[in-house]
């Protein structure tokens, strides 16, 4: 049975993984603000010159880039939500709904990445109980499948969900290396819920992926 301590540590580890992804997630581009034209600026050029109306001043160029925004820390409760998402992916594989779960990530992952500790539910929600329930539901579903030993069956499904999550992060424009590390951390945090040790993981070679060499893209580190 998954312990409270294991759930707390796994949630903390997952929160750290999400924090690393948020730090490298491209910020949305905002449209440049144009100054409102004065009433005389709409006149034709010849008429402005005749009336002596000055030209519209050029927009000043910023000498220094704006400072990088300081992102608030990701609370452990959000880490627990991400792990529940991982566990849900494992269950969906066993029920034949993995594609439906994957399609939902395009909406759910951005919601998770934008959550901060300022939201009230992050302080009031019992993530430990939810994780214990979610981990138990995976084991229950696994008993119905009956494929190999429990540890090997869990490992196979965790590896699959790790790869799917890595791809989902890449679709959000997260750099390849950061997406791979976050997915691997979430895999290891989920494994810790069942007392499984982290195993050697595939390293995502960004150059190999860019060249289409997927055999070299997944090498054991």
Image (cartoon, rainbow, N blue to C red):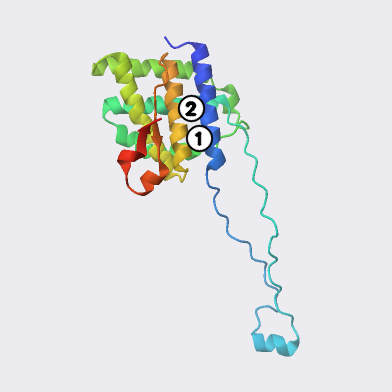
Check contact, mark 2 vs mark 1: CB within 8 A.
yes
Callout 2: few (<14), some (14-19), or many (20+) C-alpha neighbours within 10 Å? some
Instruction: Report the side of 141 relative to 2 (left or right).
Output: left
x and y, in percent, of residue 116 in the image: 59, 34
Point out which mark residue 184 bears: none
| Whole-number angstrom distance, CA of label 2 to CA of label 1 | 8 Å
Q: Residue at x 57, y 39 (%)?
A: 23
Q: What mark, if any, has residue 112 been given in the picture?
A: 1
* In the image, residue 104 above or below residue 187: below
Q: Which one is in front, 194 or 137?
A: 194
Looking at the picture, how far across and down is residue 90, in whole percent?
34, 25
In this rendering, is residue 59 above or below 20?
below
Q: Nearer the viewer, residue 79 or 104?
A: 79
Q: Is residue 167 visible?
A: yes
Please tell me which of labels 2 and 1 falls first in the chain: 2
Q: Which mark is residue 81?
A: 2
């Amino acid at each position: 049975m998954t312990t409270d301590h294991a759930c707390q540590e796994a949630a903390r580890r997952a929160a750290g993984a999400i924090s690393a992804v948020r730090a490298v997630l491209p910020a949305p581009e905002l449209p440049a603000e144009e100054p409102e034209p004065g009433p005389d600026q709409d006149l034709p050029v010849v008429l402005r010159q005749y009336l002596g109306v000055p030209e519209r001043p050029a927009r000043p160029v910023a000498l220094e880039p704006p400072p990088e925004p300081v992102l608030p820390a990701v609370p452990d409760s959000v880490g627990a939500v991400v792990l529940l998402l991982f566990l849900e992916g494992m269950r969906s594989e066993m029920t034949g709904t993995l594609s439906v779960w994957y399609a939902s990530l395009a909406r759910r992952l951005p919601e998770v990445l934008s959550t901060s500790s300022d939201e009230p539910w992050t302080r009031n929600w019992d993530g430990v109980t939810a994780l214990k329930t979610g981990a138990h539901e995976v084991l229950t579903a696994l008993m119905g499948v009956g494929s190999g030993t429990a540890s090997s069956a869990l490992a196979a499904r965790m590896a699959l969900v790790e790869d799917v999550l890595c791809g989902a992060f890449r679709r959000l424009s997260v750099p390849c290396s950061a997406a791979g590390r976050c997915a691997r951390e979430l895999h290891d945090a989920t494994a810790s819920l069942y007392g499984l040790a982290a195993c050697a993981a595939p390293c995502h070679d960004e150059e190999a992926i860019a060249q289409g060499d997927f055999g070299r893209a997944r090498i054991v580190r």
